[in-house]
């Protein structure tokens, strides 16, 4: 049964939506994040924009909660984790292919990484039930009829490639700090993800080239280190069961988390070491306010 609205008066009065709709509701076609005209792309446009409403999470919002249509599918944050940009260019920049996207939408797991947070619910409750044709159509719509070439993993960034600091006392994030962070990686991460970050086929996502590790914004990576990721049980037709990941909020200081994130970004994602202890502290506070605790 549907649940009754729990909004307090006067926000429970739907008539108040009239003003919002006057400002923001439009009959104009919704924007797209790729280009195409093939039957598969058009079918995927219907699935992604209408039935799947991908933009609800993956598009930033304005101060009144409206989706910013000029930044369609460029990424948004509604809860703790960020839904990353999924325009064709943004996906290609993180190495995605149409084949990898189709596998991800079906199983929640691919060479590009694994689904977590709300995206796992989307796959578990929705996209895994798509037909093979619709899975191809949605992947075609996201990346386009002529997908941009997936960008290869950049070479490991040099230790001094970032401007932020990762040490708790404000010291710089030089080679010594990242060397210490590798020690944390080997102690906390390597037993599952491998010493070189290659993961395990269909059971443990790789970190080398991982879409989250390759994001310019390190928010999701830092949060994964802090609060971990839940265990995903096996279900009929998928998604792929994953053992979950413990959070290290209690074990690591803000500086150590920043250093570990910077090591992962530079060594396995070709990104700069620009995560700071202050940024980690802010995300630790946000996780606490949202009720997230470190996963066991």
Image (cartoon, rainbow, N blue to C red):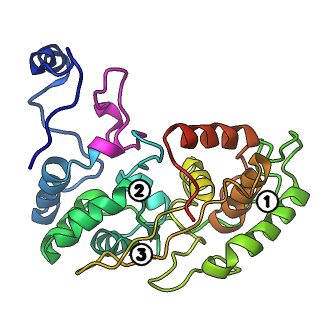
First of labels 1, 2 by sequence position: 2
The residue wearing badge 1 is 158
In the image, taking residue 57 as reference, residue 264 lies left or right, namely: right
Give, as a single range, the part of the protein colored magenta: 56-77
Marks 1 and 3, Cα distance to the nearest angstrom? Answer: 28 Å
The residue wearing badge 2 is 117
In the image, taking residue 263 as reference, residue 72 lies left or right, namely: left
- Tell whether label 2 touches label 1 (CB within 8 Å): no
The secondary structure type at the circle numbered 1 is loop
First of labels 3, 2 by sequence position: 3
Residue 286 falls in image quadrant = top right
Q: Nearer the viewer, mark 1 or mark 3?
A: 3
Q: Which mark is residue 110?
A: 3
Q: Residue 37 colored magenta?
A: no
Overall secondary structure of the magenta section: loop
- The structure residue drawn at horizontal position 78% and vertical position 67%, both measured from the top left corner, is 184
- The structure residue drawn at horizontal position 75% and vertical position 55%, both measured from the top left corner, is 252
């Amino acid at each position: 049964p549907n649940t009754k609205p729990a909004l307090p008066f006067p926000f429970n009065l739907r008539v108040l939506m009239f003003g919002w709709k006057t400002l923001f509701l439009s009959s104009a076609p919704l924007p797209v994040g790729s280009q195409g005209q093939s039957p598969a792309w058009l079918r995927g446009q219907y699935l992604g924009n209408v039935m799947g409403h991908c933009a609800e999470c993956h598009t930033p919002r304005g101060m009144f909660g409206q989706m910013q249509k000029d930044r369609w599918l460029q990424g948004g944050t509604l809860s703790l984790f960020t839904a990353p940009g999924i325009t064709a260019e943004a996906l290609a920049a993180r190495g995605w292919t149409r084949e990898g996207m189709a596998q991800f939408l079906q199983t929640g797991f691919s060479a590009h990484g694994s689904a977590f947070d709300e995206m796992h619910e989307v796959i578990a409750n929705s996209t895994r039930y798509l037909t093979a044709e619709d899975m191809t159509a949605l992947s075609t719509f996201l990346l386009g009829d002529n997908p941009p070439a997936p960008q290869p993993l950049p070479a490991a960034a040099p230790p001094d490639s970032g401007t932020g600091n990762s040490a708790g006392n404000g010291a710089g994030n030089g080679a010594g700090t990242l060397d210490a962070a590798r020690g944390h990686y080997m102690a906390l991460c390597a037993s599952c993800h491998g010493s070189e970050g290659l993961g395990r086929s269909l059971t443990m996502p790789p970190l080398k080239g991982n879409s989250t590790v390759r994001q310019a914004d390190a928010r999701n990576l830092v949060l994964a280190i802090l609060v971990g990721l839940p265990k995903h049980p096996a279900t009929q037709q998928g998604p792929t069961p994953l053992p979950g990941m413990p959070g290290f909020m209690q074990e690591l200081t803000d500086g150590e988390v920043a250093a570990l994130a910077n090591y992962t970004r530079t060594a396995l994602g070709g990104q700069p070491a620009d995560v700071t202890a202050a940024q980690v502290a802010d995300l630790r506070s946000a996780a606490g306010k949202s009720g997230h605790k470190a996963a066991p």
